[in-house]
Image (cartoon, rainbow, N blue to C red):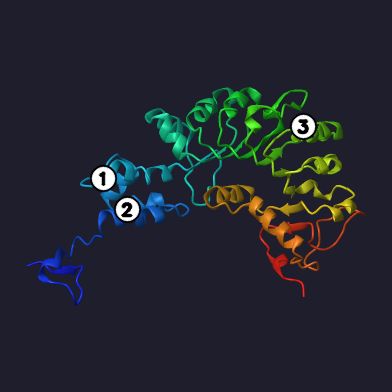
């Protein structure tokens, strides 16, 4: 006789309360089991390992209705979208998240109703492919209307109308050329910007006139609270206009190789919304932001709040070299892999 175990037994139990289960098939109640797997699946990269645990878990994650579960369709739909909440294409390392091949993504989009994708896909990292004319971004944007975060190297502005149909989009990182209609002119009143709160612009033209034109246009983004650039020329162009950005909470310079250019930052002493961040790995930062919300934007908010509260150690570190205009301390610059600035001043 196979060994068995007793479930639901306590000192107050009666014979009618005792349920005997075969030891080779130990299970929680399926609804509780599903909730446990749903929580675990929300952890970075775990869901693809979890669906190998048992066939019923795979059914919850991939197929339609779990067997013998009343209302199983609705319950399973809580798990399956987790497979697709972050879509990554075009980078070799995804730091635990799945790398979705272009062909696979297109095939899956066509196999499900648009409502599934609009509720499932929340973040998309899509880097440029070899032939821009073959990029199916129009189809992707049309299906994934629930996108909240988007970073993409768009080849040109022909996808701009599709971006304008993403009402949930809040975090946008892309090249200026993808937003311009010509001569580096960007219409920041376009519908794509109507709900953007966090904007990171890449490949800023090096000329001050072009940067100034971009900065004056940014004022027209109604919900904009966070701006990030990689070009020092944008600092020079934006600082005189910052008083026009009444809703702006953070202005971030993402330090790169060009951070050694000369620029006078002495006026930053009066600007409590500015911080420079040196990123160790922007892809990892973006992926963690998509999965947990902990990215350079969150770091900027935390640092600025600490600085306003006088909790930043002024003796920590040195700002990156800026020629004769270098200033010391960490009141403006941090490294996203270090946290020494969190030391409270005595």
In the image, 130 versus 32, the foreground residue is 32
- Answer yes or no: is residue 18 visible: no
Q: How crowded is mark 3: few (under 14 residues within 10 Å), some or many (20 or more)?
A: some
Closer to the chain start, of discs 1 and 3, is: 1
Answer with the quarter of the image where residue 116 lies. Answer: top left
The residue at the far left in this view is 1
Q: Single out the residue that lies furthest toward the right.
A: 324
Quadrant for the N terminus in the image: bottom left
Q: Are marks 1 and 2 in contact (CB under 8 Å)?
A: yes
Nearest to the observer: residue 127 or residue 214: 214
| Residue identifier under label 1 | 66
Q: How far apart are marks 1 and 3 (CA)?
A: 52 Å
- 238 on left or right of 93: right
Residue 314, image x, y percentages: 80, 66
Q: Position of residue 208 (x, y in %)?
A: 86, 35
Residue 34: mark: 2
Residue 54 image offset from top left, x and y in percent: 28, 52
In this picture, residue 90 sits left or right of residue 241: left
Q: Which of marks 1 and 2 is nearer the N terminus?
A: 2
Residue in view at x 17 percent, y 69 percent: 6
Q: Give the Cα distance between marks 1 and 2.
A: 10 Å
SS of the residue under disc 1? loop
Q: Earlier in the sequence, mark 3 or mark 2?
A: 2
Tell me where residue 237 appears, x and y as whole percent: 84, 39
């Amino acid at each position: 006789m196979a060994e068995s175990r007793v479930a639901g037994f306590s000192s107050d139990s009666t014979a009618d309360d005792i349920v005997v289960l075969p030891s080779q098939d130990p299970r929680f109640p399926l609804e509780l089991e599903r909730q446990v797997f749903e929580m675990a699946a929300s952890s970075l990269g775990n869901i693809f390992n979890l669906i190998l645990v048992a066939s019923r878990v795979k059914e919850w994650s991939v197929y339609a209705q779990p067997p013998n579960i009343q209302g199983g369709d609705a319950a399973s739909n809580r798990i399956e979208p987790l497979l697709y909440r972050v879509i990554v294409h075009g980078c070799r390392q995804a730091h635990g998240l799945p790398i979705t091949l272009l062909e696979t993504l297109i095939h899956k989009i066509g196999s499900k109703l648009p409502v599934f994708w609009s509720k499932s896909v929340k973040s998309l990292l899509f880097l440029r492919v070899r032939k821009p004319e073959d990029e199916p971004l129009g189809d992707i944007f049309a299906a994934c209307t629930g996108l909240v975060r988007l970073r993409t190297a768009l080849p040109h502005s022909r996808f701009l109308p599709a971006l304008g149909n993403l009402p949930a989009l809040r975090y946008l990182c892309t090249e200026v050329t993808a937003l311009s209609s010509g001569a580096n002119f960007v219409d920041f009143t376009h519908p794509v910007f109507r709900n953007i709160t966090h904007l990171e612009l890449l490949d800023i033209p090096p000329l001050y006139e072009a940067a100034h034109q971009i900065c004056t246009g940014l004022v027209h983004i109604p919900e904009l609270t966070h701006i990030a650039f990689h070009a020092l020329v944008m600092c020079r162009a934006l600082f005189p206009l910052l008083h026009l950005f009444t809703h702006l909470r953070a202005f971030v310079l993402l330090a790169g190789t060009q951070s050694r250019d000369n620029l006078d930052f002495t006026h930053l002493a009066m600007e409590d919304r500015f911080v420079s961040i040196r990123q160790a790995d922007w892809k990892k930062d973006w992926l963690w932001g998509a999965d947990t919300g902990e990215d350079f934007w969150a770091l900027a908010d935390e640092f600025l709040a600490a600085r306003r509260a006088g909790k930043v150690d002024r003796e920590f570190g040195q700002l990156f070299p800026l020629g004769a205009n270098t200033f010391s301390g960490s009141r403006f610059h941090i490294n996203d892999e270090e946290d020494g600035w969190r030391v409270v001043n005595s």
